[in-house]
Image: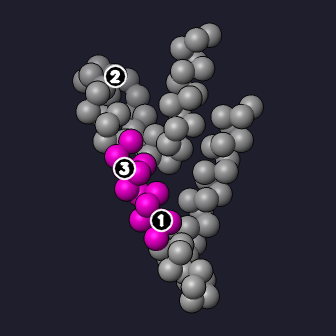
């Protein structure tokens, strides 16, 4: 339940930050949103890059959207993998 709630919050944050690119917010808020978007892209990009470098070719072919999900949801996707493996 916590993981699903975290993923929903991340989707809201991504939509909030990307909406600023389409229709910019007022002056001080748009600068903060640009900075937050850049930070999100860098951090989640690094997480996705680390994941893709550790996956074997068989794992990459089994699930092509694994890296994209890590880019979007970050740590919550890793927690959901851990939860699935423990079951």
- Pick whichever, 14 or 57, lies toward us: 14
Q: Main secondary structure of the magenta part?
A: helix
Mark whose residue sits in front, 3 or 2: 3
Is 2 left, or right, of 68 in this rendering? right
Q: Where is residue 25 shown, x and y percent of the image?
A: 60, 83
Task: Answer whether residue 84 is visible to the viewer in this image.
Answer: yes
Q: Which label belongs to residue 59?
A: 2
Q: How far apart are marks 1 and 2 (CA)?
A: 29 Å
Task: Answer whether residue 61 is visible to the viewer in this image.
Answer: no
Pointer 1 local density, CA inside 10 Å: few below 14, some 14–19, many at least 20 = some
| Range shown magenta | 35-47
- Which of the two labelled residues, at mark 1 and mark 3, occupies the earlier sequence position? 1
What SS does tag 3 mark? helix
Q: Which label belongs to residue 37?
A: 1
Q: Where is residue 17 shown, x and y percent of the image?
A: 55, 67
Q: Is residue 22 above or below residue 18?
A: below
Mark whose residue sits in front, 1 or 2: 1
The residue that appears at 50% across and 42% down in the rendered structure is: 74
What SS does tag 2 mark? helix
Q: How far apart are marks 3 and 2 (CA)?
A: 19 Å
Q: Where is residue 86 shown, x and y percent of the image?
A: 58, 11
User: Was residue 8 drawn as part of the magenta stretch in this picture?
Assistant: no
Q: How far apart are marks 1 and 3 (CA)?
A: 12 Å
Disc 3: which residue: 45
What SS does tag 1 mark? helix
* Number of residue marks: 3
């Amino acid at each position: 339940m916590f993981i699903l709630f975290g993923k929903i919050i991340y989707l809201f944050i991504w939509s909030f930050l990307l909406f600023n690119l389409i229709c910019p917010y007022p002056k001080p808020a748009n600068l903060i949103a640009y900075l937050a978007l850049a930070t999100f892209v860098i951090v989640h990009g690094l997480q996705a890059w680390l994941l893709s470098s550790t996956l074997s070719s068989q794992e990459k072919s089994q699930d092509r959207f694994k890296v994209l999900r890590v880019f979007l949801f970050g740590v919550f996707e890793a927690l959901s993998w851990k939860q699935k493996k423990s079951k």
